Image (cartoon, rainbow, N blue to C red):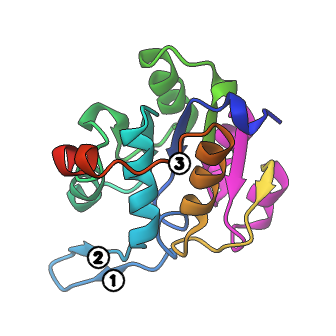
Amino acid sequence: MTDLKDIKAFAFDIDGVMTDGGILADLEGQLYRTFDAKDGFAVRMANMNGYPVAVITGARSQSVRARFSGNGIPPEDIYLGSRDKIADFDDFCHRHGLKRSEVMFFGDDIPDIPVLVAAGIGVVPSDAVDEAKEAADIISDRPGGKGCVRKHFEDVMKAQGHWNFDVQLYKNKF
């Protein structure tokens, strides 16, 4: 496993990681998810401190794009409808000049396993499926959608001295 001080970027799945995995659907087929604001703030902190961040998800909802664009993730780093997550992970790494070992990846289910294994540090929430837990470097003490992402983003940034909140930068960026 890579040392926290060697992590230069983050990537994560959505359902079961940034959410608790629950999805509401209306009669028109519109899907709704609930996100933890603290996880979203961690994404903003990473963005303000120069860490590239990617969303790699099988979800196709444009609401996911809107949610994370608002947290500073550029459109080209939001991979919706991903059916080959390792290919999308490699594209993200290539475009940002990163080695796989320099990225912390969060996943919770079987499609995430190749990236959990390839990333420098693979993290799963406490309620991930057993196969994903076996592939991960870290099993969080927090479930998906309940601060798992926040905890481990914060751990990395604190280890590197980058967990610093700049009010003016925050006002200008968000």
Q: Which residue is mark 2?
A: 32
Q: Is residue 166 left or right of residue 129?
A: left
Between the C-alphas of marks 1 and 3, the distance is 34 Å
From the viewer's perspective, is 156 left or right of 169? right
- Kindly identify the amino acid type of the residue bearing the numbered disc 3: Trp
Decide if residue 23 is on the left or right side of residue 86.
Answer: left
Badges 2 and 1: C-beta atoms under 8 Å apart? yes
Say above or below: 126 vs 60.
below
Q: Upstream in the sequence, badge 2 or badge 3?
A: 2
Depth check: give the residue in front, 104 or 61: 104
Residue pointed to by mark 1:
24
Q: Earlier in the sequence, mark 2 or mark 1?
A: 1
The residue drawn where x is 52% and y is 28% is 87
Mark 1 or 3, nearer chain start: 1
| Type of the residue with mark 2 | Tyr
Q: Hey, what amino acid is under mark 1?
A: Leu
Which range is magenta? 106-135
Query: In the rendered structure, does residue 54 fall within the stretch colored magenta?
Result: no
Residue nearer the viewer, 16 or 59 = 16
Residue 3, image x, y percentages: 78, 34
Q: CA distance from mark 2 to mark 3?
A: 31 Å
**Pick the front one: 156 or 94:** 156
Characterize the local packing of mark 1: few (<14), some (14-19) or many (20 or more) Cα atoms within 10 angstroms. few
Which quarter of the figure is the N terminus placed in? top right
Residue 8: tell me if it is visible: yes
Q: Can you identify the residue that label 3 sits on?
A: 163
The crowd level at tag 2 (other Cα within 10 Å; few <14, some 14-19, many 20+) is some
